[in-house]
Amino acid sequence: MAPAPPPAACFSAAEVQRRLAAGACWVRRGARLYDLTGFVRQHPGGEQLLWARAGQDVSADLDGPPHRHSANARRWLEQYYVGDLQGDPQPSGLDINQQLFPASISSFKM
């Protein structure tokens, strides 16, 4: 039997915010966090699309419209998985992007 994978790292919202403020391009899909900093320049749709979504949940962007990402793109994304967001990724009645990552949208690099 194969050994179990190591447990995922957990990051607080404050830690994610610090990384964004330092210039990293982290996105999330639900509670899963991805560091796309090394992929930004390779993104077929252009790096601006990723920088504009730094700190945000990209679930809707992956499912389209205007562009539904392929199964291959989703597998590619998993290469950049770094861990999970601690706590409830969607507190009731609150916009997670504004609550957890208020400076991320204005601090992206183009």
Image: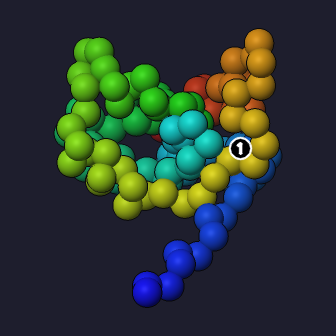
Give how far across and how far down residue 106 sits, in percent: 60, 26
Visual colour scheme: rainbow
The kind of residue tagged 1 is Gln
Residue under the image location 21 percent in, 38 percent down = 70
Quarter occupied by residue 9:
bottom right
Quadrant of the snapshot with the C terminus: top left
Residue 74 pos. (x, y %): 31, 45
Q: Quadrant of residue 79?
A: bottom left
Location of residue 3 with respect to 31 vertically, above or below: below
Along the line of sight, which residue is nearer the eye, 48 or 70?
Answer: 70
Give the class, few, some or many, for how many residues have Cα within 10 Å of label 1's Cα (few <14, many ≥20): some
Q: Is residue 65 left or right of residue 97?
A: left
Image-quadrant location for residue 63: top left
- Look at mark 1 in the image and give the residue it sits on: 17
**Residue for point 30% across, 52% down:** 75
Camera sees residue 13:
yes
Q: Is residue 37 visible?
A: no
Q: Is residue 60 left or right of residue 27?
A: left
SS class of the residue under badge 1? helix
Q: Position of residue 62 (x, y in %)?
A: 35, 30
Q: Residue at the spot x=75%, y=36% of the render?
A: 88
Q: In the picture, which quadrant includes the N terminus? A: bottom left
Number of labels in the image equals: 1
* Residue 103 placement (x, y as % from top left): 69, 30
| Residue positioned 62% across, 42% down in the render | 31
Side of 77 relative to 23 (left or right): left
User: 85 or 107: which is nearer to us?
Assistant: 85
